[in-house]
Amino acid sequence: MVDIHSVSELLKDLEFFREFGEATIELLAGCATNVAYRPGDYVFREGGSADAFFIIRHGDVALEIHAPGREPLVFETLHPGDAIGWSWMVPPFKWSYDARCRTVVRGLSFDATCLRGKMEADHEIGYQLMRRFLPVMSRRLLGARLQLLDLYAAEKAR
Amino acid sequence: MRTAGERPGAPGGSADPMVPRPFRVTRRRRETADTFTLDLVAEDGKPFAFAPGQFNMLYVHGVGEVPISISGDPADGTRLVHTIRAVGKVSAALCAMKRGDLVALRGPYGKPWPTVEAEGHDVVFIAGGVGLAPLRPAIVHAIANRHRFGKVIVLYGARSPADMLFAEEVQRWRGLFSMEVDATVDRAGPDWLGRVGVVTKLVERAEFDPAHTLAMICGPEVMMRFSVEMLTRRGVAEDRIYVSMERNMKCAVGFCGHCQWGSAFVCRDGPVFRHDRIAHLNAIREL
């Protein structure tokens, strides 16, 4: 059985939820549960149903893309305080990469169906969550663009 | 140590800033697949003084001359260290040099990193790729004079784990209790246990007092631009952010105009600039 009180206390400690009010925290806590993974475990895999999103409280997670005949390419690592995944917000709700634990990972998992239901029922909560996720998405998009530029590659002398 | 504003070429170099001195390669180390470090000793045995952030013009006989930042310890006047990436004809010739070969050198040139202004502040060094080489003398200076600074933080971004410069030394810095070092790479295989992502993420997370922080940044211009943006977002004033610019430097003394950037000559007025003084130039795409 989930201890809602302790989960809401955990949420209050996380930077990600700092701007949320007490009532919203309690509502979100109702969709959350504590999770723990061992090194090498997958939080989710590409193509799987995006039925949750995660906040890391402890440990490191590598986001990886697989290509046939090649070893997995790690394109980002996430660390304590980071949120993993926004595919749960966007149809068709499928993960587009793997999230593999590089260490023991402890965190909070939020049930996507529960969250989406609360966002639909109360658009204020939906707005607050979108407002919180958009900067994360924006920063990661910028990071991906910079990585795509391959800035550190050698430039030929002019 | 020289201070900004002293005449180029003195006292470490020859009396005439356009006349090179012969230096002999005493050691060559491979840093990455295309980057090498050369230790040089003056043939005349005279010491060579420089300030962190300055550069020399290195001439390979019959091939040409290129500007290369000094990457060694500024307190060591006997051994000059240059880290060179093979990207063109001259730099490739330098990288191919062996122990005992001669190189002609003039310098040091340019405005240095603000090591004196940084005293009493938290100091954040942000390096991207081979940009760690021009920052290394300032980092070595900060370690040697640790008590003069607040926190000393090195944030380093590289293309991949194999492309990390001075990898063993960065590990050693990380092991010191007196400084914080964090590194990230743009891409990695599953065996890499460090961070993956852009260097601005490290800037976002680093713990320093923005009101009392001085930052020195060296790397690709796009990386520097976004690092400056993250620092200012965190509250570091633009007049305490310094960047090292790279342009096509030829004469190194502000005569030829090849490295002109707006009203500045990068060789003479830089390569280290205080960001608030050059921010307007970044907005001009034609420069």
Image (spheres, coloured by chain):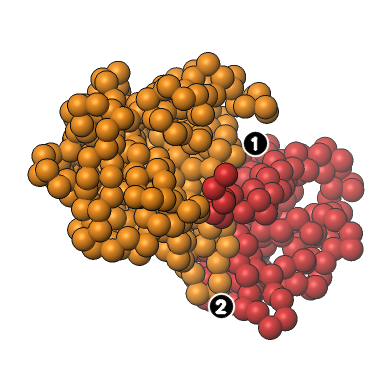
Chain colours: A red, B orange
Q: Dot 1 corresponds to which residue?
A: A19
Check the residue under mark 1 and report the chain it is in.
A
Mark 1: give few (<14), some (14-19) or many (20+) Cα within 10 Å: few
Q: Give the x, y percent position of residue B227.
A: 53, 37
Residue B121 position, x and y percent, is 31, 28
| Amino acid bearing label 2 | Gly
The residue under label 2 is: A40
The answer to whether residue B157 is above or below residue A99 is above
Image quarter where the C terminus of chain B lies is top right
Residue B11 in sight:
yes
Mark 2 element type: loop
> In percent of the image, x 78 and y 43: which residue is there?
A130
Residue occupying the point 54% across, 54% down: A154
Which amino acid, mark 1?
A: Glu
Is disc 1 placed on a helix, strand or loop?
loop
Cα–Cα gap, marks 1 and 2: 33 Å
First in sequence: mark 1 or mark 2? 1
- Left or right: where B19 falls relative to B144: right
Task: Please state the chain letter of the residue tagged with numbered disc 2 in the rendered image.
Answer: A
**Displayed quadrant of residue A123:** top right
Q: Could you tell me residue B282's position as x and y percent?
A: 60, 26
Residue at image point 79% right, 73% down: A48
Q: Residue furthest bottom?
A: A69
Give the residue at the far left of this rendering: B45
Which quadrant of the figure has residue A94? bottom right
